[in-house]
Image: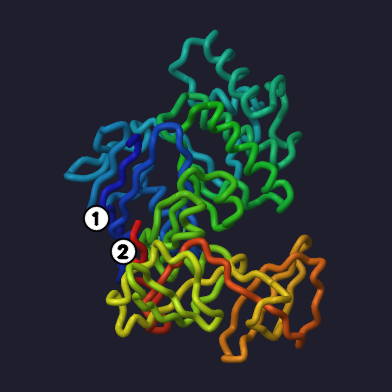
Amino acid sequence: MHVEVNRLSVAYRGRERPAVEGVSLGLRAGDIGVLIGPSGCGKTTLLRAIAGLEPASEGEIRISGEVVTGGGTHVAPEKRRIGMVFQDYALFPHLDVARNVAFGLDAWPRGKRAQRVAEVLELVGLAGSEKAMPHELSGGQQQRVALARALAPQPQLLLLDEPFSNLDVDLRERLAHEIRGILKAAQATALFVTHDQLEAFAIGDEIGVMHEGRLHQWDDAYTLYHRPATRFVADFIGHGVFANATLKRVGNQVMVHTALGPLADSAECPLPSAFSYGQCEVLLRADDIVHDDDAPVKAEILRKAFRGSEFLYTLRLATGEVLLAHVPSHHDHKVGEWIGIRAQVDHVVTFQREAGAAAAPIASFAA
Ligand SMILES: Nc1ncnc2c1ncn2[C@@H]1O[C@H](COP(=O)(O)OP(=O)(O)OP(=O)(O)O)[C@@H](O)[C@H]1O
């Protein structure tokens, strides 16, 4: 692993709980990791600790195999060869683009410096803009200059903290894809902080979900969505509900009984003995619930939200259980109508039944 964080904790003086607690993750060279989570969960603190701007109270950080934090070592931030991009572009307003980008290249020979500036400006799509002043550029262009400046000295790691949060939504989405392309072209290893899930999915090879200082899961987007390791991750990513279910062993198979009938693919299901009387909850995503006029199970539409190509329906079964369903928007039913639904679940993800158990990771599926 190019970046290794092992059981890292960071505590601010005077705070009861550490801001980062026992976090471990690994980032391969050339990969983009993204940290997401609600405000105050510790994303920025983790990034700052990796940059060397916060000391660790426990644990270790290695970059390219070298311990930079931990075991009595604390390599100074400027010695870590880390580039940083923050939400406020932090360009020097009185310096032109070329000088801004060349800021970290003092030690480079003059000729090479200009060449490198031209190279990274081309990489970020701003070739030839050396002489422009920051105020002549749009917010998105300024942020690309900031990225060029961070990439110029060929850092061994790039840290980006909510770099798009000052930009409008349309631009953010386009830039997210562009930045991924730029980072990949530069073969940069990067760790990115955002609280926007779509941005995280657009950019990250690996995504970490944090809550109250802890890293609940570090995985690719598909796995986070379909195999959330904790209730918090299941709740935080995507739309869905936890529905009551009972696991029963039938021959060599485990059947998952729900108010929607038995779930088909239960290959990854734990044994009933993992739960008291096999009683648990299963995660039903809005896209696991399929509208089907011929289905024997009917549900009443409580609410509907138009999302362009689809509706997000909130449904209630006769048993009282509430579900969410994505339904193509040409199926425009009225609130109060009863429609046929069935479950089409690829992965059965189970959780203990106790309500409100948001924190403890549950090894709920056989990986
Ligand atoms: N310098 C500091 N001194 C004391 N406490 C701090 C300091 N910086 C952050 N904290 C606290 O540490 C916790 C984690 O903060 P952090 O900024 O890392 O979270 P975050 O996930 O980046 O939040 P946001 O998304 O709002 O930026 C919060 O409870 C915050 O109040």
- The image shows residue 116 at horizontal and vertical percentages of 55, 17
Residue appearing at x 62%, y 52% in the figure: 165
* Secondary structure at numbered mark 2: loop
Residue 60 visible in image: yes
Residue appearing at x 72%, y 26% in the figure: 132
Q: Amino acid at mark 1?
A: Ser
- Determine whether the beta carbon of the residue marked 1 sits less than 8 angstroms from the nearest atom of ligand 1: no
Q: Quadrant of ligand 1?
A: bottom left
Residue 361 visible in image: no
Which residue position holds label 1?
57
Q: Earlier in the sequence, mark 1 or mark 2?
A: 2
Which residue position holds label 2?
18
Residue at far front of view: 251
Marks 1 and 2 in Cβ contact (< 8 Å): yes
Tell me if mark 2 has few (under 14), some (14-19) or many (20+) residues whose alpha carbon lies within 10 angstroms of its own.
some
Corner quadrant of residue 325? bottom right
* Secondary structure at numbered mark 1: loop
The Cα–Cα distance between marks 1 and 2, rounded to whole angstroms, is 9 Å
Q: Quadrant of the N terminus?
A: top left
Q: How is the image coloured?
A: rainbow
Residue appearing at x 38%, y 67% in the figure: 269
Q: Taking 229 as reference, is 324 above or below it?
A: below
Q: Amino acid at mark 2?
A: Pro
- The image shows residue 297 at horizontal and vertical percentages of 63, 82
Residue appearing at x 42%, y 60% in the figure: 210
Left/right placement of residue 314 relative to residue 345 reads: right
- The image shows residue 95 at horizontal and vertical percentages of 63, 28
